[in-house]
Image (cartoon, rainbow, N blue to C red):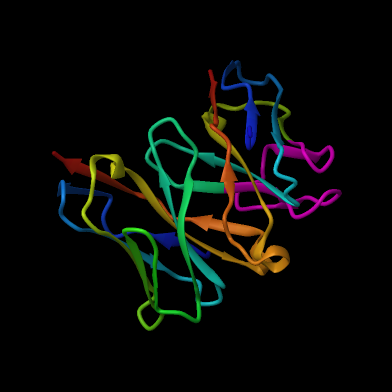
Amino acid sequence: GESVGLHLPTLSVQEGDNSIINCAYSNSASDYFIWYKQESGKGPQFIIDIRSNMDKRQGQRVTVLLNKTVKHLSLQIAATQPGDSAVYFCAEINTGGFKTIFGAGTRLFVKA
Amino acid sequence: NAGVTQTPKFQVLKTGQSMTLQCAQDMNHNSMYWYRQDPGMGLRLIYYSASEGTTDKGEVPNGYNVSRLNKREFSLRLESAAPSQTSVYFCASSNPYRDRGNTEAFFGQGTRLTVV
């Protein structure tokens, strides 16, 4: 079936370094790809999305890259801070936006 | 601004018992969703409601029923709970990009359900 997965289940980075979280997807027909952040005991929070006809989008300290040739999505976090420690999910969305399908997640640890 | 509110926050059920998880949103969103999250896993879509009066199956609908009571409320019912339904359940809402041009879904705090 359709699925969105992640290469790295855990990632540990030094405070101040840049983080790169990767994701592979399988459904070429998805309209958008999204990154969510989930802190312990909370629901996921939207970070950034990218439309399928784009290859890069930047937000505040975050950049999402989309490579449709190899069906790969990445989230780059600049100058990683302790508050960035969380689980990050990539997700894909289609059919007008009604069905968001999540990947397994990557846990990011930020070392002070 | 409460956003998405789920009740209860915690619940323990015996196998075979039934219960309803409640969800309400105050953002006037058209669409609402129920997900489950198993330990160390991503979220899997159980059911969704694209708009008031409609519901559709997601990835893992077996063992669940839903009711879109009105625009604000979307409930999830377990008729006969099983240990395999032990999970954290999240409700979410959004105005899908088809209607509003955005993709963001807003999530509640979750309901931790244990079935023994």
> Range of the magenta residues?
B45-74
Residue B95 location in percent, x, y?
69, 56
Residue A86 location in percent, x, y?
33, 42
Closer to the camera in the image, B62 or B57: B57
Residue A24 location in percent, x, y?
37, 67
Judged left or right of residue B66, residue A97 is: left
Residue B10 figure quarter: top right
Residue at (61, 20) in percent of width and height: B15
Quick check: is B50 in the magenta stretch?
yes
Residue at (54, 48) in percent of width and height: B44
Closer to the camera in the image, B90 or A18: A18
Judged left or right of residue B41, residue B57 is: right
Residue B106 figure quarter: top right
Residue A70 figure quarter: bottom left
Quick check: is B116 in the magenta stretch?
no
Judged left or right of residue A7, residue B53 is: right
Count of marks, rendered view: 0
If the image is split into quadrants, where does the C terminus of chain A sit? Answer: top left
Closer to the camera in the image, A88 or A4: A88
Residue at (41, 52) in percent of width and height: A89
Judged left or right of residue A107, residue B10 is: right
Closer to the camera in the image, B37 or A50: A50
Residue at (26, 55) in percent of width and height: A8
Looking at the image, is B89 positioned above or below residue A80?
above
Residue A22 location in percent, x, y?
30, 62
